[in-house]
Image (spheres, coloured by chain):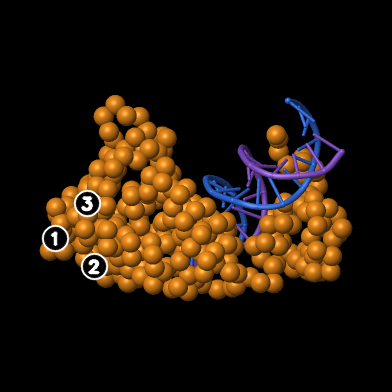
Chain colours: A orange, B purple, C blue
Amino acid sequence: MGRHSCCYKQKLRKGLWSPEEDEKLFDHITKHGHGCWSSVAELAGLQRCGKSCRLRWINYLRPDLKRGTFSEEEQRLIIDLHAALGNRWSQIASRLPGRTDNEIKNFWNSCIKKKLRLRSEKPPDDELATPSSVINNSNFDSAASESQSSTQNLPLWFEQINNSNGGDTFTPTANLPQDPSFQPFRDLEGGAGTMELQSCAPWPALLPNEGAEIHTGGEPEDLKWSEYLDGTIRCMYGIDKGEEQQQQQQQLNFWHRN
DNA sequence: AATAATGTCAACCGCTAGTAG
DNA sequence: ACTACTAGCGGTTGACATTAT
């Protein structure tokens, strides 16, 4: 299977949509529906490929879209859903009416990524840093079950960063590493593409699976943020590949019942 | 005020899955 | 079974806006 055929077509417009193009597309779809996307552009009198029209409709023109920043409730939901589903943005978006997968993905990659980065880069306050021995599974069990079963509470690490305004007033409260050169992942000897989540990782307040292996499929320096976060969250919540589908199904069943 | 650095977000790219012929 | 095509997805890019120096 090759590329989408429209990619080969010449003289099609790319880049930002003009108000006139938006109007043409909106008018056409509200009157006739989109039908086959590849024919929408032509029928609407647009020099665009069908793929571009579809994206513009889904991400911007759809009348049921919600605008503006994410509410706290939505943020909670995104974090919970990402913990359960990983980078399945479309599935996450399907649980947030009026929000698009693109929007959620952008939110995650800018806002939450930044918060995590801040968290991992801030040197710990000596009096607040807690040795890894404080971490224990009983702490995690209650927090993890709370996080997974409820959308009422943000994970502690997120609350801490969120409340810090991302500025100089940041005051970590739990489990930060003493060593500023601390790296959350370390190589396992002889295991290419395999890393271990260090104890006392800088972002979560509680770690369930200290020492759990994370298979990244690449060298540490090649680790992408999505993999980094996904691996982190899997480790935090004790989600292994085998159980993941089952958990996802249970979660979906729960949602469908409610 | 000018420039650089950083953040945000719309849009594109490349891929897979599904489907019709 | 195979091919051609579309829909949809997640990753990435790049233009523009904002903030820092």
* Mark number, residue A171: 2
Q: Are marks 3 and 2 on the same chain?
A: yes
Q: Chain of mark 2?
A: A
- Mark 3, other Cα within 10 Å: few <14 / some 14–19 / many ≥20: many
- Residue at left 27%, top 63%? A142
User: Which x, y percent locates residue A30?
Assistant: 80, 69
- Residue at left 72%, top 54%? A52
- Identified by mark 1, the residue type is Asp
Point out the frontmost of discs 3 and 1: 3
Labelled pair 1, 2 in contact (Cβ < 8 Å): no
Residue A255 appears in view: yes
Between the C-alphas of marks 3 and 1, the distance is 14 Å
Using the image as rendered, state which of residue A207 and residue A187 is in the foreground. Answer: A207
Q: Earlier in the sequence, mark 3 or mark 1?
A: 1
Q: Secondary structure at mark 3?
A: loop
| Placement of A229 over or under A205, stated as above or below | above
Q: Chain of mark 1?
A: A
Labelled pair 3, 1 in contact (Cβ < 8 Å): no
Image quadrant in which you'd find residue B15: top right
* Mark number, residue A126: 1
Mark 3 lies on residue = A200
- Residue at left 60%, top 69%? A98
User: Which x, y percent locates residue A110?
Assistant: 46, 59
Q: Secondary structure at mark 2?
A: loop
Q: Earlier in the sequence, mark 3 or mark 2?
A: 2
Image quadrant in which you'd find residue A186: top left
Using the image as rendered, state which of residue A239 and residue A29 is in the foreground. Answer: A239
Between the C-alphas of marks 1 and 2, the distance is 11 Å
- Identified by mark 2, the residue type is Thr
- Identified by mark 3, the residue type is Cys
Residue A169 shown left or right of residue A117 in the figure? left
* Mark number, residue A152: none
